[in-house]
Image: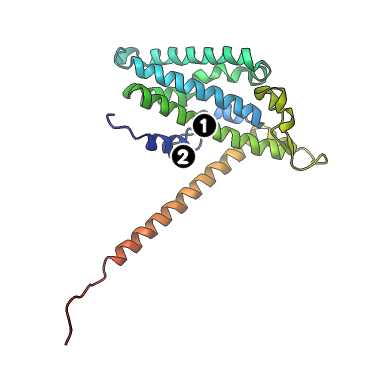
C-alpha cells in the first residue's frame, strides 16, 4: 500500500471499520469485563497499547520475515507486547490487574490485534502502522467505555466508581450518584446477557446513523442532478 491517508485510517478505526461494532472482534473480553467504566477503561488502554506496539514491530520486520513464518512471528511479537503491558499493570495498577485477571493475557488471542498486524502493518511503513494501531485501539476502547458506562449506570445507579484504581486516590471523589442512594440495583445489566443487549443496541444505533447519513447523501446527489437540468437563455427577445 503506497499512499496512506491518515484521515481514512482515523475514520476506519473510530467508525466505519470499528473492531467492536463492525468487525465484531474481541467481543469475549468486551462482554465479560465491561461491567464498569474503570474495568472497561483498563482493558481498553491495555489493548490500545498492545495494538500500537505490535503494529509498529510487525511493520519494522515486514521485509525480513517470509510468508511461511509470518503468523508465528506476529504472534510472538503480540505475546511480548502483552507481557510488557501485563508487567506495567502489575507495577502501577495492581488492584485493577487482579480484577481483570485472565483477560489481560488473553489479549494475545484477540483477533483484532492479529488481524491489524496481518492486514495492515505487514504491508505498510512504521508511522502509518502505529497510527492504525492507535486508532483501532482507540475505537475499541471507546466502545468498551460506552458499554461499561451504560452497564454501570443501569446496574448500580452511579458512574465512574473506583476510578482510583487507575488514576490514584484523588479519583475516589469522581463517582457520580446519578439515581440516588435508593436506586434498586439491576443485577441483570452487570451480567453478560446485559452486555449482549447493550452491545446490540450500540450496533443498531450505529447502523441507524449510517443509514440516515447515506439517505441524506443520496438526497443531496438527487437535488444536484435535478438542478443541473436548468436551461439558460441568452440574447434579446424582440
> Residue 28: x percent and y percent?
56, 27
Q: What secondary structure is marked by label 1?
A: helix
Determine which quarter of the picture holds residue 57: top left
Q: Which residue is mark 2?
A: 15
Q: Residues within 10 Å of mark 1 (few under 14, many from 20)?
A: many
Q: Nearer the viewer, residue 85 or 184?
A: 85
Is 62 positioned to the left or the right of 145 in the image? left
Q: Residue at x 60, y 28 (%)?
A: 41
- Work out how far the residue at label 1 is from the one at label 2, CA to CA, in angstroms: 10 Å
Q: Residues within 10 Å of mark 2 (few under 14, many from 20)?
A: some
Residue 90's place in the image compared with 197, above or below, is above
Q: Residue at x 36, y 19 (%)?
A: 59
* Residue 169, visible in the rendered structure: yes
Mark positioned earlier in the residue sequence (1 or 2): 2
Quarter the C terminus occupies: bottom left
Residue 124's place in the image compared with 160, above or below, is above
* Residue 32, visible in the rendered structure: no
> Residue 123: x percent and y percent?
32, 24
Q: Nearer the viewer, residue 223 or 196?
A: 223
Q: Residue at x 62, y 30 (%)?
A: 34
Q: Which residue is mark 1?
A: 140
Amino acid at each position: 500500500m503506497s499512499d496512506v491517508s491518515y484521515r481514512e485510517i482515523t475514520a476506519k478505526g473510530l467508525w466505519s471499520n470499528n473492531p467492536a461494532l463492525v468487525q465484531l472482534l474481541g467481543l469475549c473480553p468486551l462482554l465479560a469485563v465491561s461491567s464498569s467504566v474503570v474495568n472497561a477503561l483498563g482493558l481498553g488502554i491495555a489493548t490500545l497499547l498492545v495494538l500500537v506496539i505490535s503494529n509498529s514491530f510487525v511493520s519494522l520486520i515486514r521485509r525480513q520475515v517470509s510468508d511461511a513464518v509470518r503468523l508465528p512471528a506476529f504472534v510472538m511479537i503480540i505475546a511480548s507486547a502483552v507481557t510488557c503491558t501485563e508487567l506495567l499493570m502489575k507495577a502501577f495498577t495492581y488492584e485493577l490487574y487482579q480484577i481483570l485477571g485472565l483477560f489481560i493475557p488473553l489479549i494475545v488471542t484477540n483477533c483484532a490485534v492479529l488481524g491489524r498486524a496481518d492486514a495492515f502493518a505487514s504491508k505498510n511503513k512504521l508511522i502509518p502502522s502505529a497510527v492504525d494501531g492507535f486508532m483501532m485501539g482507540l475505537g475499541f476502547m471507546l466502545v468498551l467505555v460506552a458499554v461499561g458506562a451504560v452497564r454501570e449506570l443501569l446496574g448500580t445507579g452511579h458512574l465512574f466508581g473506583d476510578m482510583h484504581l487507575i488514576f490514584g486516590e484523588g479519583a475516589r471523589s469522581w463517582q457520580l450518584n446519578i439515581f440516588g442512594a435508593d436506586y434498586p440495583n439491576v443485577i441483570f445489566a452487570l451480567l453478560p446477557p446485559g452486555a449482549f443487549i447493550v452491545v446490540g443496541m450500540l450496533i443498531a444505533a450505529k447502523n441507524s446513523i449510517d443509514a440516515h447519513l447515506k439517505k441524506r447523501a443520496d438526497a443531496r446527489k438527487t437535488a444536484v442532478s435535478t438542478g443541473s437540468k436548468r436551461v439558460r437563455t441568452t440574447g434579446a427577445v424582440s
